[in-house]
Amino acid sequence: MPDLTKPGSPCAPNAQHAVRQAKRLADNLVADLHGKPMSSYKHAYAGSVAGLGLHQGVAQIYGVRLKGPFAWLLHRTYHLSRMPTLNRKIRVAADWTLALPFRRETVSLGALQRPRQEFEPAAGRRPDQPAEGGSRMQDGAASRLAPLLVRILLGTEDARGSELPIRVRAWDGSVIGPATAPTFVIRHRRALRRLLWKPGEIGLVRAYIAGDLDIEGDVFAALGAVQRVMRIGDQPIRLSSDDKREIVRSAVMLGAVGPEPKAPPEEFPVGRRGQVADGPLAVDPVFFERMLGPTMAYGCALWDDAVDLDHAQGLAHAAMAARLGLAPGARLFDLSRGWGSFSLYAAAEHGVRVVTLAQSQRQAEHLRQRASQAGLADRVDVRVGDLHAVGDGQYDAIAGLAGTEQADLLNSGSIVPRLYELLAPGGRLLVQQMVRRPGPHPVRRTFTTSYMFPENAELRPLGEIVTALEEGGLEIRGISALREHHARTFRAWAANLQRHWAECGALATPGRARVWLLYLAASALACESGRIGVHEIYAVRRDREGRAGETMVEHRAVYRR
């Protein structure tokens, strides 16, 4: 093409002319279509710039010759101004800035397979539109996410030689990871910011509950793939200096750098005691009816001969009533603070008089309504509060179910003596209690303490609980392991929640529904792996002569009071 600024000379075959000529050609085509005059292409030579390596360059601008770092800076500035899309300008500028204090990276790893991808939006192609060849892109943001997530989730020591144990789909539709692995969907870059600020369990949980991160398919398989992360709570991930630099570099290139996002509203602030008014149980009772089932049974079901959840809960209620020796006219105290299923069963099937605890007035009103509908209002007394709300002992039996809570029913040193006072001589205590393995157990902030039960959520070994009961004057008569039964109960509750997902999200909030699903799935996996257990502990208060009422040995009565 002739250079009109220099008659008789052609334009130089360089990118500067090509870009400007393309724009002038497009403008002329539009002008011709509308019957308007076209204009010629003229571009006067202003100068040239060139880079000669790191921090060195040469330039000639309007006849002025320059060299050294200033010429190099002019070269970088000019090329940055010519870069298409604001997004690309910011990323390139950030990468050049980071290259000043850090070591150089000569290749943009995310662009190895498809170097044109970053420029496709400027050409009008949508991120989710098939590229050349008709297949969806597999190497966009996801390809850069893989090494970043491996470091954030596993740390330096475990990340070496490790592959991402999950499949990831990024916000631009790109995918990476084994096709058969559980899929984590990163819907927003904010999910990465949460992980950058809180690597490990807390960051992952916040991203999921806020909806920035989603899980497709089997939530149990997905959490199982990253359950090592879910074990360490807010314990810092070990990262080397090189890892930290690479994480920052990758995060900048992905546009994920920024201030720490606010924690989801479902999270309890650090240092504040959880309140019933904003806790996990402070939702519409219908939510729990959908999750727990029509009977709203709150304890560990027995699955040996059961065909479904309701049947398994019925078998568990019958077994508990037998262990407690319930008989017509007996007084039962239910300290579970659940939804009253066992209390209603005991009153209806065994004719006992029950005092049951509720955590809130709303829960108490629901329990009273259920008792009235069942014709048991005169036999089921619902009270709000803790053991201090039960001042009219003594009771022939006391029951406490593990339910959904990991909280220690016998956590306080004053609870066991109080239970001893409430039990009549010869009375029986039956509690289902979650426990942990013996050994060192540093107190730390976890998903459970942050979102579910901020108080008394640290579990104790079984031996400590047995010792506390015996030191309180009670005699242990039997202990049964229910770990596998409780894991299956958690899974059944999670299945109910997923079956009514949209309704439960409307009854509570989408975030609260996610909290419950995550808690149920994580607890089921913890039970199945043996990291936590559930035991049913049976104890009695001996009478003045040291007798324990009816003693059962191999299900045969050997003594009756």
Image (cartoon, grey):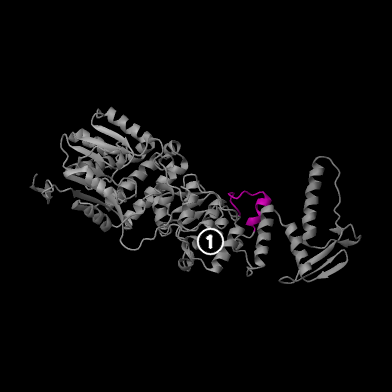
| Number of residues whose C-alpha sits closer than 10 Å to that of mark 1, classed few (under 14), some (14–19) or many (20 or more) | many
* Horizontal relation, residue 486 to residue 135: left or right: left
Above or below — where is 250 with respect to 516?
below
Q: Is-magenta flag for residue 118?
A: yes
The residue under the point 36% across, 61% down is: 441
Above or below — where is 488 with respect to 106?
above
Majority SS type along the magenta span: loop
Which residue in the structure is indicated by mark 1?
148
Could you tell me if residue 156 is visible in this image?
A: yes
* Horizontal relation, residue 27 to residue 172: left or right: right
Please state the extent of the stretch shown in magenta in the rendering: 116-132
Q: Residue 155's x, y, as percent? A: 48, 64
Could you tell me if residue 315 is visible in this image?
A: no
* Horizontal relation, residue 101 to residue 12: left or right: left
Q: Looking at numbered disc 1 in the image, what kind of residue is underneath it?
A: Leu
Residue at the extreme right: 7
Q: Is label 1 in a helix, a strand or a loop? A: helix
Q: Residue 211's x, y, as percent? A: 50, 46
* Horizontal relation, residue 62 to residue 298: left or right: right
Q: How many marks?
A: 1
Q: Residue 320's x, y, as percent? A: 21, 44
In the image shown, does 452 or 529 lie closer to the viewer? 452
In the image shown, does 81 or 435 lie closer to the viewer? 435
Q: Quadrant of the N terminus?
A: bottom right
